[in-house]
Amino acid sequence: MLVIAVTGGIGSGKSTVADLFKDKGIPIIDTDQIARDLVQPGEPLLQQIIAEFGQEYLDPKGQLKRKDLGNLIFTDQAARNKLEAMMHPAIHAAVIAQLNKLNSPYCLIVIPLLARSKHAYPYDRVLLVDIPETIQIQRTMQRDQQASDFVKHIIATQPPRDELLKLADDVLDNSGNLSDLTASVAKLHQRYLALAEKNP
C-alpha cells in the first residue's frame, strides 16, 4: 500500500484536502484526531497531562481545555517540549496500529508537523498543502477567532515554508477556491492510484 504523508502549516487546508480524498474512498489517518482521542476523559494520557500542567486545564466535565493548553504551549517552549514528549510516542503508536488494519491501494496520514517529528512515520511520498502566509493568517483568524498577532506567533513556531517545500514530493496549491482544490485532488488521486499500481 502506498502511504502519503500530508503536511502543511496551520490554516493551509489539510483537513479539507483529506476530506476530498476521503470522498474518493481513500482511508485517512489524521494525527490531530488521534491526539484529540488520546486526551478524552478516562484516557491515561489525559491524566499524565493534568498531573504535569495542573487541574486548571480540566473543565467541570473532565474535558481537557484544549484552547487554554494551546495558548500555553505556543508561548512557552519548555511546556511545548514537555507536552510533545508525552503526545508524540502515543500518536505514533496509534498511527502504526491504524495502518496495519488498512487494505487500500493507498492511504493518507495527515501529519501537520512532519518536518519536526522525531518519530519515523512510514510513508512513501509527502504531499504539502501550500498557501501564502497572508491567506494562512486570514483563514486561521476566521476559523479559530484569534487575533492576527497570535496566529503569526503560531506560524513562527512551525517549520518555515522553504523547509516544507524541500520535504515535499507533491505540492498542492490551496490559495484558490474549493472548485480549484477539488480538481487538483482529482488529478493527484489518479496519480497516486497509478503509483500504487506500479508499487503494490
Image: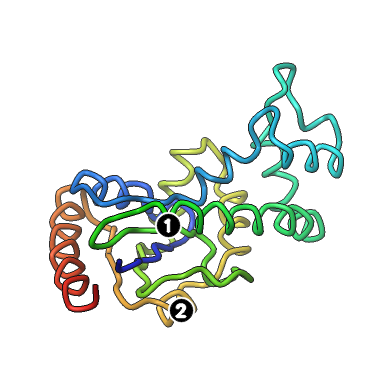
Q: From the viewer's side, name the closer residue of 17 and 120.
A: 120
Q: Amino acid at mark 1?
A: Leu
* Left or right of residue 51, residue 170 in this image: left
The residue lying at 30 percent from left, 71 percent from top is 171
Residue at the image position 50 percent from the left and 51 percent from the top: 31
Q: Is residue 98 above or below residue 3?
A: above
Q: Which one is in front in this view, the residue at disc 2 or the one at disc 1?
A: 1
The residue pinned by badge 1 equals 99
Q: CA distance from mark 2 to mark 1?
A: 29 Å
Indicate the quadrant where residue 126 lies: bottom left
Which colour scheme appears in the figure?
A: rainbow
Determine whether, in the image, residue 103 is placed left or right of residue 110: left
Compared with residue 187, is residue 61 higher up or lower down, i.e. above or below? above
Q: Residues within 10 Å of mark 1 (few under 14, many from 20)?
A: some
> Helix, strand or loop at disc 1?
helix
User: As displayed, is residue 47 above or below residue 193?
Assistant: above
Percent across and percent down for residue 186 are 14, 58
Residue 194 percent location from the top left of the image: 14, 72
Is 42 on the left-hand or right-hand side of 136? right
| Residue shown at the point (40%, 52%) measured from the top left | 101
Q: Secondary structure at mark 2?
A: helix
* Mark 2 residue type: Asp
Q: Residue at x 84, y 30 (%)?
A: 55
| Rendered image: mark on residue 188 | none
Q: Is residue 142 above or below residue 62?
A: below
Depth check: give the residue in front, 165 or 97.
97
Instruction: Please indicate whether residue 173 sits to the left or right of residue 122 in the image.
Output: left
Q: Which residue is mark 2?
A: 162
- In the displayed orientation, state which residue is furthest to the bottom: 166
Q: Percent from the top left, x then y, of residue 15? A: 37, 48
